[in-house]
Image: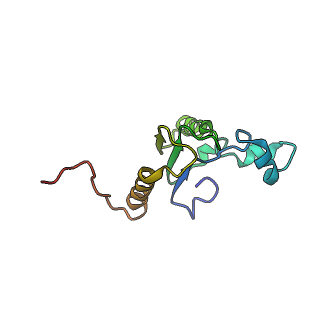
Amino acid sequence: MLFHPEFYKAAVSACGCHDNRIDKQWWNEQWMGYPVGPHYDEQSNITNAAKLQGDLFLIVGEADENVPPESTYRLADALIKANKDFELLSIPGMGHSDGGAYGRRRKRDFFVKHLLHAEPPKRNVVIN
């Protein structure tokens, strides 16, 4: 979505690590190396938020103890500052997850809308 918009048209990120400088060091340094250098900034979704093309849906568990929710909120802030449209679902009490049954349903509805260009069912309508 940031670096290959010609291929990716819609994406969902659940409990995403959007900048490896925010997450736990021991995990990211295995893949990114040490010391922290300019390559951390270059790969950051937060730093590159203004490059967003396509439709993006962010899901975050507000009680995630694995990937800090701050990472998603910082990305949302950067997207807002770059005047980008996106969807954000913060799930109260949810830990490191895809959002559970509710998050998975919302993710499916997002793809139906943005890839199939169809309206998902209206689940709040009572049919008698």
| Residue closest to the far right | 35
Q: Position of residue 34 (x, y in %)?
A: 87, 46
* Colouring scheme, one of rainbow, by chain, secondary structure, one colour: rainbow
Residue 123 is left or right of residue 18, and the answer is: left
Residue found 76% across the figure and 49% down from its top: 27
Quarter of the picture holding the C terminus: bottom left
| Residue closest to the far left | 128
Residue found 18% across the figure and 50% down from its top: 126
Quarter of the picture holding the N terminus: bottom right
Q: Position of residue 11 (x, y in %)?
A: 52, 56
Q: Position of residue 29 (x, y in %)?
A: 81, 48
Q: Quadrant of residue 82?
A: top right
Q: Quadrant of residue 69?
A: top right
Q: How many marks?
A: 0
Residue found 61% across the figure and 44% down from its top: 49
Q: Quadrant of residue 110?
A: bottom left
Q: Position of residue 79 (x, y in %)?
A: 55, 40
Residue found 55% across the figure and 39% down from its top: 76
Identify which residue, 102 or 56, lies in the foreground. Answer: 102
Identify which residue, 66 or 10, lies in the foreground. Answer: 66
